[in-house]
Image (cartoon, grey):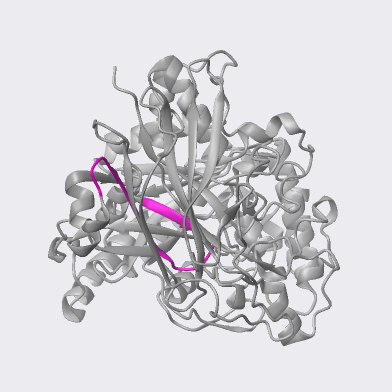
């Protein structure tokens, strides 16, 4: 019997799915679970919702091979605040539940390693699959070898023939997907917690990362009409967009895609050219902007907002780049300086202005979010509660020093991991439709983990007097929120800026405005302005730099003190260098005071010996979606 026959008949599965759906409707009625129709939308977004749009479970083959045994149900229970037991047996719980979650398991080989592990060995006639089965049974070290071999073979398209066969893939995937959508539907609680349907499209050309997380606005009824789209079938981003077009036409639903880890695309994520290598056309730019309104700017595998090579005058441009800027995802190709401009979001935003100047359309009109990309099924982004990238990286005395190295990845999978990232969404309700619609409008921001409350509005007549009234209403009625184009106006645009610290976290150091623009000659520019900061009576700008906030971190106790910084920063700011003829964008970067990183907590709890070069403290941050200014014709 060939491996493609693991599945069996689809009809009983569909019948079972319908029966479960009926049972769930009765259960919802008895429990009082609300539908989206029961949730009242506020006039304007009044609350920011924090979530993770990028989490992997045991249904992702790389995660399973790396040892993870927690599935979608455990992931959703954990995100909602329940205590679960991690794969390595550690009790895990969030200090605060999330508001929403997207389980984005890899569509390529969805649950394939799990199925190989569970399959009777005699059914596996392919020698590679049989070897993988045997090694998966032995334990974590052997499983990790299988996972790394799978990733390498996937990148080079040398997988066993059966794993590349479309019919076989469809049969294997159908039951996994419908089971998954049933779990997601069961844990979706409109008004309280939103569970999204989604997956990851894992396009990777010889190790160059072009991955996208795909999110559906819809429920099980529509999601089950399709299967997650595999990069083994569609080998270019525009083929993913074809799939998205077909999904909306077939189901009447809505769908979006979010590129991530552009920092390891080796220059391919944000190119100036079109897919054929020629000039990017307006139609291509328009399609990309419509299908990919957001970008995941920060996550466990590094931060993609900026880079010191591209922004040498930005003293904070080196956050989370250690090791991750060496090469592509698999380290099959090292990075050269000319690749960096296509890897980082700030440069992409500038390139978008240049393309718009030439074609009339901005393909990189991107809102920014963060997420974890955790492969543990545990969406943790706090430094003191970091459960690692995968099960082999869960809390221990040795994980920060990268003892296993996993071959070519040495130097970037120990202390270099970031603790995570979260997506913050200003929405009118905690429902699929409201959060999805806010994402499409780009009214979102990225955080590296802390739950700061950040808001910015752009207009023409804001003043400090607005703080004394309903300034949020003023922001919407007389201006636009993050993610929008400035409305036409006269004079100099004014930005109403508000940042509140995470109530369980560190004070704020400063708020910066990052401006990018393109001049008439097509040259790209940027500048970072310190807008408002803590302790302004003592801290001054000298030589173009603001006096540092200070440092209260105690590495011996993995602690800090909020005796410096400010709990809240707000300002109405106008660009002192504004030119009405110049196309530009503006976004906020909010910095906390220095705090200890997760390796310091490992040292305290487990006696971990940390590498001499390990980064032990940092200033966590948030990045808002930009507000764009377009000159009037």
Q: Residue at x 72, y 35 (%)?
A: 206
Is 461 inside the magenta-drawn segment?
Answer: yes
Residue 367 visible from this viewpoint: no
Q: Nearer the viewer, residue 474 or 555?
A: 474
Residue 285 on image: x %, y %: 43, 24
Identify whether 603 is placed above or below 374: below
Magenta extent = 444-462
Q: Residue at x 55, y 30 (%)?
A: 525
Residue 270 on image: x %, y %: 56, 32
Q: Residue at x 70, y 63 (%)?
A: 66
**Quadrant housing residue 183:** bottom left
Q: Is residue 348 left or right of residue 487?
A: right
Identify whether 114 is placed above or below 173: below
Identify whether 144 is placed above or below 496: below
Q: Nearer the viewer, residue 401 or 633?
A: 633
Which quadrant does the C terminus fall into? top left
**Quadrant housing residue 555:** bottom right
Is 224 inside the magenta-drawn segment?
Answer: no
Q: Nearer the viewer, residue 266 or 47?
A: 47
Q: Is residue 2 left or right of residue 454?
A: right
Residue 324 on image: x %, y %: 72, 50
Q: Is residue 48 left or right of residue 76?
A: left
Residue 494 visible from this viewpoint: yes
């Amino acid at each position: 019997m060939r491996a493609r026959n693991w599945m069996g008949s689809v009809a009983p599965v569909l019948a079972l799915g319908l029966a479960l759906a009926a049972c769930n409707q009765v259960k919802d009625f008895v429990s009082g679970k609300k539908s989206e129709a029961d949730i009242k939308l506020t006039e304007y977004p009044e609350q920011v919702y924090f979530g993770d749009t990028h989490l992997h479970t045991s249904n992702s083959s790389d995660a399973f091979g790396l040892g993870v045994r927690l599935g979608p149900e455990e992931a959703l229970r954990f995100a909602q605040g329940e205590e679960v037991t991690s794969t390595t047996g550690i009790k895990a719980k969030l200090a605060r539940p999330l508001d929403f979650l997207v389980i984005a398991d890899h569509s390529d080989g969805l649950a394939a390693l799990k199925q190989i592990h569970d399959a009777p060995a005699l059914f596996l006639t392919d020698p590679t699959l049989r070897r993988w089965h045997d090694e998966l049974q032995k334990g974590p070290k052997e499983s990790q070898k299988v996972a790394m071999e799978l990733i390498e073979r996937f990148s080079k398209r040398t997988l066993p023939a059966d794993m590349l066969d479309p019919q076989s893939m469809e049969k294997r995937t159908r039951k996994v997907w419908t089971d998954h959508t049933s779990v997601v539907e069961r844990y979706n609680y409109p008004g309280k917690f939103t569970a999204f349907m989604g997956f990851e499209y894992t396009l990777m050309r010889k190790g160059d990362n072009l991955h996208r997380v795909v999110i559906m606005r819809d429920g099980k009824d529509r999601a089950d009409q399709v299967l997650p789209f595999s990069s083994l079938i569609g080998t270019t981003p525009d083929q993913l967009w074809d799939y998205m077009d077909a999904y909306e036409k077939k189901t009447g639903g809505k769908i979006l895609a979010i590129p991530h880890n552009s920092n390891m695309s080796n220059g391919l994520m944000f190119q100036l050219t079109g897919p054929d290598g020629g000039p990017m056309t307006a139609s291509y730019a328009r399609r990309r902007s419509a299908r990919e309104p957001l970008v995941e700017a920060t996550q466990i595998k590094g931060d993609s907002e900026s880079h010191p090579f591209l922004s040498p005058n930005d003293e904070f441009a080196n956050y989370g780049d250690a090791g991750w800027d060496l090469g592509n995802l698999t380290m099959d190709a090292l990075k050269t300086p000319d690749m960096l401009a296509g890897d980082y979001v700030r440069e992409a935003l500038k390139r978008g202005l240049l393309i718009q100047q030439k074609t009339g359309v901005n393909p990189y009109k991107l809102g920014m979010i963060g997420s974890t990309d955790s492969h543990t099924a545990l969406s943790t982004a706090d430094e003191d509660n970091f459960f690692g990238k995968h099960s082999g990286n869960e809390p221990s005395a040795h994980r920060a020093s990268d003892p296993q190295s996993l071959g070519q990845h040495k130097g970037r999978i120990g202390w270099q991991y970031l603790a995570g990232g979260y997506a913050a969404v200003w929405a009118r309700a905690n429902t699929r439709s409201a959060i999805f619609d806010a994402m499409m409008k780009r009214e979102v921001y990225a955080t590296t983990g802390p739950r700061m409350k950040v808001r910015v509005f752009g207009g023409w007549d804001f003043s400090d007097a607005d703080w004394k009234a309903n300034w949020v209403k003023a922001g919407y009625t007389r201006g636009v929120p993050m993610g929008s184009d400035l409305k036409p106006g006269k004079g100099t645009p004014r930005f109403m800026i508000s940042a509140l610290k995470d109530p369980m976290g560190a004070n704020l150091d400063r708020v910066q405005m990052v401006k990018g623009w393109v001049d008439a000659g097509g040259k790209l520019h940027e500048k970072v302005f310190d807008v408002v900061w803590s302790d302004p009576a003592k801290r001054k700008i000298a030589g173009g730099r603001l006096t540092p906030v200070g440092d209260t971190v105690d590495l011996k106790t993995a602690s800090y003190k909020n005796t410096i910084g400010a709990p809240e920063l707000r300002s109405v700011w106008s660009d002192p260098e504004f030119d009405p003829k110049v196309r530009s964008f503006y976004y906020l970067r909010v910095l906390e005071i220095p705090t200890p990183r997760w390796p310091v907590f490992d040292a305290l709890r487990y006696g971990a010996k940390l590498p001499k070069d390990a980064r032990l403290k940092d200033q966590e941050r948030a990045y808002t979606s930009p507000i764009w200014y377009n000159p009037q014709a």
